[in-house]
Image (spheres, grey):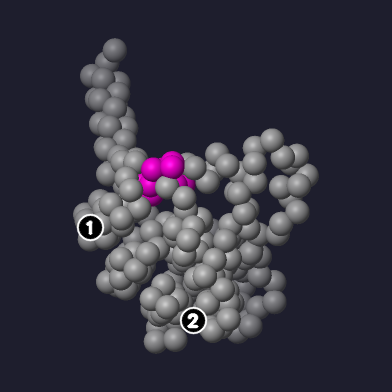
Amino acid sequence: MSNKNKNNTRKNKNNGNNEAKQMKELYPHLELSFSDAQEWLIKHLDSAAFKKRENASNTISSIPILQKIVKEGMITQNSQEGTISKGVNKFNNTFYKEKQRAYLSGFLLHKDSFKFVDWINTYTDKVAFVTAIIPDDIDNEIRRTTTPIAVTVGTSSKTKLPENPTNYTIDSIIPQSFDEETFYSIKRSSNIKDDVHVDFVNVFDPKYGRLASSKDGLYADVLKGLKH
């Protein structure tokens, strides 16, 4: 083997080791109690490992309120700020516009989840639901009876986009159901032991472009709902 090939092999191995280390830092699968998983996540949100996550820069300014949300009883798993952006895609030289709905997903103890969802849906203009867990032995046709909810839409063109484009396509979604394998995989990635009775809860803002961290945004309402 030439020195060049040896160097490439060593470089690829180091890259693989670094990626594995980073994944271990992000998702150590510690199998903790709910309260211990809360404490771990509060510290993790301030860690260097979290800041290396893809798109973490969009979340950094919201970390203090996310930590409060975790402390009040929601082990957050994913979130989106609710931005509207436009510009030129440098890869294909096209104009684009993207609109987000703010959303937050995570785990609540079963004893708290439906009360929280009911409060959000009753007293705020946000929408919350508990993700349905579909047993693995249920026919696939039944799995397709729920429609995922669009939370990011986008459009692009080789010519200048109009101010209010009407040809948006769905870029990302929130599913209304999981199969059991997916549910337990996400639960383990949040360091929660299998025997802890939790539900996966989603909250989203039906209004595109309202920032989650704004005064009347999603995070403030979630925090109120958890404290209620």
- How would you rate the neighbour count of disc 1 (Cα within 10 Å): few for under 14, some for 14-19, many for 20 or more? few
Place of residue 176 in the rendered image (x, y in percent of width and height, measured from the top left): 63, 58
Place of residue 8 in the rendered image (x, y in percent of width and height, measured from the top left): 29, 27
Along the viewing direction, whichever of 32 and 12 lies nearer the viewer: 32
Q: Quadrant of the N terminus?
A: top left
Q: Is residue 217 visible?
A: yes
Residue at horizontal 49 percent and vertical 58 percent from the top:
110
Q: For residue 194: magenta?
A: yes
Q: Main secondary structure of the magenta part?
A: loop
Q: Is residue 21 left or right of residue 139?
A: left
Read off the residue under disc 2.
210
Extreme-top residue of the structure: 1
Read off the residue under disc 1.
43
- Splitting the image into 4 quarters, where does residue 10 fall? top left
Q: Amino acid at mark 2?
A: Arg
Residue at horizontal 38 percent and vertical 59 percent from the top:
75
- In the depicted structure, whether residue 203 falls above or below residue 77: below
Place of residue 41 in the rendered image (x, y in percent of width and height, measured from the top left): 29, 56
Q: Amino acid at mark 1?
A: Lys
Element at badge 1?
helix
Q: Is residue 219 left or right of residue 35?
A: right
- How would you rate the neighbour count of disc 2 (Cα within 10 Å): few for under 14, some for 14-19, many for 20 or more? many
Q: Which residues are magenta?
A: 186-195
Q: Nearer the viewer, mark 1 or mark 2?
A: 1
Residue at horizontal 32 percent and vertical 32 percent from the top:
16
Q: Quadrant of the C terminus?
A: bottom left
Q: CA distance from mark 1 to mark 2?
A: 28 Å
Q: Is residue 158 visible?
A: no
Q: Is residue 219 left or right of residue 164?
A: left
Q: Earlier in the sequence, mark 1 or mark 2?
A: 1
- In the depicted structure, whether residue 126 falls above or below residue 45: below
